[in-house]
Amino acid sequence: MKNCSNNLDGLAGVIILAGGASRRMGTAKAMLTLPSGEQLLDYHVRHASKLQIPILVADNGRGFQTGLDVHLEKTNSPIIHIADYGADVDSNEHDARVKTGGALVAIESALQTLSDLNDSGISKNVQASWLLVISCDSLIPATDLWQKLQCKMSLAADKKVICLKDDSHLYPLLGLYQLSIERDLKNYIDSGQRRVMQFIQPLVQAVPFSKEWQNLTNFNTPEDFNQACAALPK
């Protein structure tokens, strides 16, 4: 893979989207076990920790825990569990069915959290302007995704979302979101909208998949996941 830069100055944080219902998978994707024995959430946290930025876990209130004490090893990589924007975090009701407001409410919460970290001085890089988004239907490491997408940051100055694409689809949940969209995203959600593609369409710059990544993402069934595991680099 061609390297663009090792500069992390533009990256404010990473959000791992782990709150989906995963009905076709039959179990939460974040808790899937890789051939190495590592759970998928730990896999993403471990790779994201190499970026030395805050790691935000959006698990839709499901309480997934990681087996990694990243915050003890890297002071720039605290693990922060965040509630979806607009979620009733004080509700004591339990529903066996997983309900989700979609990815955008998690991304909005992440944007707000990073703004709060900047204001409090916890963030080490207050000038950083991008959030890296990774969904738990992918085995692409955060470090590799950042390396791929940042190539377009300076070439698409008018675009505020940069994400992967293949021959026929965009992958908006494997992308970079500029922190400056927070207010517009909040207004969009507050108006009752939840569709990701509708929101990002005017803002997006697409980056073609690396060929070796094609089978590492978009898994929704156990069979899909097994194929993705088989495609992992040895």
Image: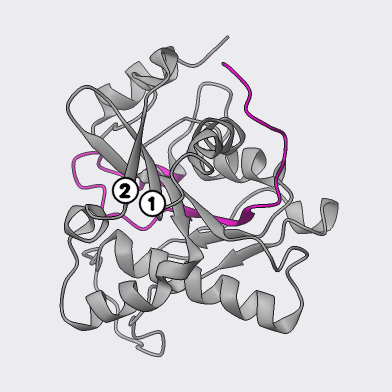
Residue 222, image quadrant? top left
Q: Is residue 141 above or below residue 187?
A: above
The amino acid at mark 1 is Lys
| Quarter placement of the N terminus | top right
- Label 1, secondary structure: give it: loop
**Which comes sooner in the sequence, label 2 or label 1?**
1
Q: Position of residue 163 (x, y in %)?
A: 38, 41
Pick whichever, 163 or 48, lies toward us: 163
Residue 129, image quadrant? bottom right
The amino acid at mark 2 is Val
| Residues under numbered marks 2 and 1 in contact, where contact means CB atoms less than 8 Å apart | yes
Please report the residue visible at 21 percent of the width from the left and 22 percent of the height from the top: 167
- Residue at mark 2: 204
Q: How many labels, in total?
A: 2
User: Residue lying furthest top in this view?
Assistant: 234
- What secondary structure characterizes most of the magenta part? loop
Is 191 one of the magenta-colored residues? no
Q: Position of residue 136 (x, y in %)?
A: 40, 43
Judged left or right of residue 157, residue 113 is right
Please report the bounds of the magenta region as a residue range.
Answer: 1-30
Circle on res. 159: 1
